[in-house]
Image (tube, grey):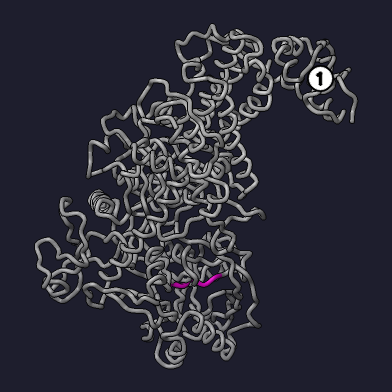
Amino acid sequence: MADNTQGTDTPTTVNYPDKPALEGLEEKYSRQWREQGTFAFDEDTTREQVYSIDTPPPTASGSLHVGHMFSYTQTDVIARYQRMTGKNVFYPLGWDDNGLPTERRVQNYYGVRCDPAYAYVEGYRPPEKPARNQRDWDVVSRRNFIELCEELAVEDEKVFEHLFATLGLSVDWKRTYRTIDDRSRKVSQLGFLRDYRAGNAYMAEAPTMWDVTFRTAVAQAEIEDKEREGAYHRVAFHRPDGEKVFIETTRPELLASCVALVAHPDDDRYKALFGSTVRSPLFDVEVEVKAHHLAQPDKGSGIAMICTFGDLTDVTWWRELELPTRALIGRDGRFASETPEWIAAGAPAERYANVASKTVFSAQQAVVEMLRESGDLEGEPKKITHPVNFYEKGDKPLEVVTSRQWYFRNGGRDTDLRDALIRRGREMDWHPPFMRSRYENWIEGLNGDWLVSRQRFFGVPIPVWYPVEADGELDYDHPILPAEEQLPVDPAAEAAPGYTEDQRDQPGGFTGDPDILDTWATSSLTPQIATGWAVDEKLHSVTFPMDLRPQGHDIIRTWLFSTAVRSHSLADTIPWTNTALSGWILDPDRKKMSKSKGNVVVPHEVLEKYGSDAVRYWAASAKLGADTAYDEGQMKIGRRLAIKLLNASKFVLGQGVTEASVIGPGADASVLTNGLDRALLARLRDVVTQSSEAFARYEYARALQLTESFFWTFTDDYVELVKDRAYGARGEAEQASVHAALATTLDTLLRLFAPVIPFATEEVWSWWRSGSVHRAQWPTADSFAPAVADADPEVLAAVGQALSGLRKSKSEAKVKQRTEVLSATVTGSAAQVDQVQVGLEDLKAAGNARELALSEGTVDDGGLLVTDVVLAEAPA
């Protein structure tokens, strides 16, 4: 094979295999590209020369699926195109390995669970066979648990890297990062501290969405609604005059937490009650009847009880109506064991004892039974199906508990900030443009700031300590902060500045914040992490703000928005200029693929079956933002295309063409003496122009469509038309002309196809060119435009259509295609007749036609018509 050393400009000898094949190309070239640094970023650069990509860091603890191949291929196609246009592409890749997904995987993989109260065990190894029952799992210290998370995450990342290399991602593998490594922890903690000092981060004790299974707070962006069965319970509250006021609720267990009743201010049924009081059933607590516009007159009885807290609407009512707090459900999802002070002794307290320490489910059963006994439940519960809040990774409904948490300001409670973040979104170019509305709709629907603290173990620690006062209480108002040069820190394992470890949790000493940052609080800084913010300022200056953020449209509300929030607060800018949104992968029934549905396809099986170029073809055929069906039929087409490219290239190079045959910038184009050859390159010129324009608009699928359509016309029509001439049947000048057209077309097609099918194009390039096709310049129409300035690009289509007519006539006559045509007539418009005339001799040779008459006339479909065909032999 020819030498493929990068950077050599001298022509190589042409050397191609007897039987070109796709097998083995992925391993060959992924290794070669890495060894030769084909996609390495050059740090000796200016910002104008750089195209930087904020590549999504996949969750390393998750399993790979075809969605990864789909969206990451689309990004890689853009990266390869930008590199070929001369950009110094900064294309790192990270692994998102901190947070709950990794914890869950480690727990299940090793059969362990974490308890921070346990002591660290040096050299701990988990059992070889994890216990099936979680109650029998090993309990380990926080430090041991984190070590296991680190260990397994690294192994998972190796699997990801191998798949992405096989897929042909042109990332710079020397520039990877992990969202839990020292650099990421430093950047994340630094961002937290600077936001805190600027007033953008704050601590507050407030109602919080809480997952009782994982014992952690949950942010608004992590909440999803799931349809669940429930029931409306019609319950009587009591007025002082003995009259009853009926409410309908799905959560009767919260009666002990009731703080008010609420109805719409315009509801005539309840206007007379506003400002008066009623007493709750069972617990006999006096509550006021209030008016609020969020009450729904057409829902239930039109009047609702406000509890602290049943859902986020309760939180809104509680805050805006300035109601008391009577929270009873704790972080464990159980009711408080002690009778609250607002419930009087006697019968009310005895009734509360029936729900004390119970789970929500058991408490509801107990309350409903007591309501039946007291006569305060009218009728039987009416079954319904309704949306219930869940943590996106949880299995039980969320509760609202009161807790002390850290927040980032995100516009949810600040109109000016909200408007500023909407303006930031409008500074970006969105691909496709309509996706911007999803970003703005999310911002406009926020009902609170971004909760960023999590009660977990494996993540970036919140870099804060608190003084312990003489009475043992914590002074949350005067947190102890580390110096920036100390970062990263772990307050749970390191003493606060100015203190010693023996002062931990002692009066007059300190305590470390036990929580970690939400994984999005770190992922929101991927532009800063990747570009070296606070670590490598030179790199940061030439790569930030970044040029592209590719991601799925389903995480606009999380990753995209959170990154915009942090860039606005920390850098007063947008984090990137272009946003490219990928769609979902759908199964044949048009349902989103997900592990929970059991309809996920494993990537390595598909890659082994069809090859990377074929899979990439399928992914690149889909437009940005378009939900796309998983379609192996498209992969088969892609594989056929890649194989055809190998074989067609072998034919072209087999004619004796070399790099010297290519008509490039400044080359002598006088060799192009044949009109059909010049028409081919005129058509190619238009394809290059349109493809380049499409890529510039991030419409790579359109560029692929244009290139592929031209390629099949080239192989099916042009190559067939010129074979005789290519073999020298019409003399050296005609042969030289067709060789120049073939070489120039092949050279250009390889460059046009390179972003999408990198392995086949690199293989063909190595047969006759030096260096890598992926470091070659993107083709420009200027390269050969002067040679075809007056050529008609429609000539090839007309001649090809005439050739199809001759072939069809032979097929209908059931004779071989090499059967001689003694005579035939080709009819078309005047322009079409002129076009066929340009390639008439090639048409005769390809169709084995002795005489072809050209006739002007009108054809019904506007095409060409071949008639009066006289064949040299009769049908068999």
Residue 738, quarter of picture:
top right
Asked if residue 440 can be seen in this view, the reply is no
| Residue 470 image point, x, y percent | 12, 74
Q: Check disc 1 and report the residue beneath it.
A: 820
Q: Going 30% across and 62% down the picture, which residue do you hit?
A: 516
| Residue 415 image point, x, y percent | 40, 47
Is 127 or 647 nearer to us in this picture? 647
Taking the image as shown, residue 74 lies to the left or right of residue 639, namely left
Q: Going 52% across and 18% down the picture, which residue do you hit?
A: 781
Q: Describe the element under mark 1 as helix, strand or loop.
A: loop
Q: Give the answer, above or below, for where 127 lies relative to 839.
A: below
Main SS of the magenta segment? strand
Q: Going 38% across and 39% down the picture, which residue do you hit?
A: 32
Are there few (<14), some (14-19), or many (20+) residues within 10 Å of tag 1? some
Can you say which quadrant of the picture contains the C terminus?
top right
Tell me, yes or no, whether the highlighted magenta stretch contains residue 306.
yes
Taking the image as shown, residue 204 lies to the left or right of residue 321, namely left
Is 474 or 164 nearer to us in this picture? 164
Residue 55, quarter of picture:
top left
Q: Give the answer, above or below, for where 221 lies relative to 583.
A: below
Q: How many marks?
A: 1
| Residue 624 image point, x, y percent | 54, 40
Q: The magenta stretch spans which residues?
A: 304-308
Can you say which quadrant of the picture contains the N terminus?
top left
Tell me, yes or no, whether the highlighted magenta stretch contains residue 429.
no
Farthest-out residue, front = 18
Asked if residue 562 can be seen in this view, the reply is yes
| Residue 343 image point, x, y percent | 41, 84
Say what amino acid the circle numbered 1 marks: Glu
Q: Going 61% across and 64% down the picture, which residue do you hit?
A: 297
Is 580 or 239 nearer to us in this picture? 580
